[in-house]
Amino acid sequence: MATFITIGYGDQAGYDRTDPSVRDVAHAHDAHLAEGGARIGRAERPVQVRNPDGRGTRREDGAFMRADLPVAGFMLIEADDLDQAVAMVAETPCAVAHGVVEVWPLSRG
């Protein structure tokens, strides 16, 4: 099995314009993934950490990444391959509620 981290992007407007029955199915899908071992979390306010040349830690509030939609959450999943990982997240709330989900394969090593 390979490990993948997913990043879900979406905003409240896209979520709100998605039919509630579609959202309910997507949330049930998330629950099913969690029962199968996926680690799922909603994104909270991030901080940036820097320690240039090991001379002292600096911390700044806010995200370093910029995107058209805000980061909504993360998931750590195990799948046989990228195709299976994509299939696993295709029915999640961000994917169906006018957002997007990135799937990042993690290398071992």
Image (cartoon, rainbow, N blue to C red):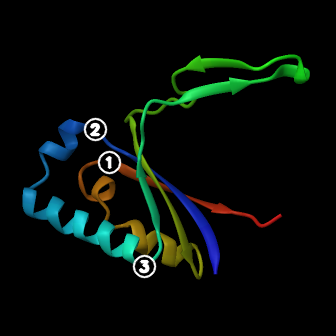
Which-is-in-front pick, marks 1 and 3?
3
Label 1 to label 3: alpha-carbon separation: 24 Å
> Residue 80 at what x, y percent from top left?
59, 82
- Secondary structure under tag 2 reads loop
Q: Is residue 53 left or right of residue 86?
A: right
Q: How many numbered circles are shown?
A: 3
Amino acid at the residue labelled 1: Gly
Q: Residue at image x 18%, y 68%?
A: 25
Q: Residue at image x 22%, y 38%?
A: 12
Which-is-in-front pick, marks 1 and 2?
2
Q: Is residue 14 left or right of residue 32?
A: left
- The answer to whether mark 1 and mark 2 are in CB contact below 8 A is yes
> Residue 87 at what x, y percent from top left?
42, 74
Mark sitting earlier along the chain (1/2)? 2
Mark sitting earlier along the chain (3/2)? 2
Tell me the number on the disc at residue 36. Answer: 3
Q: Is residue 92 above or below residue 37?
A: above
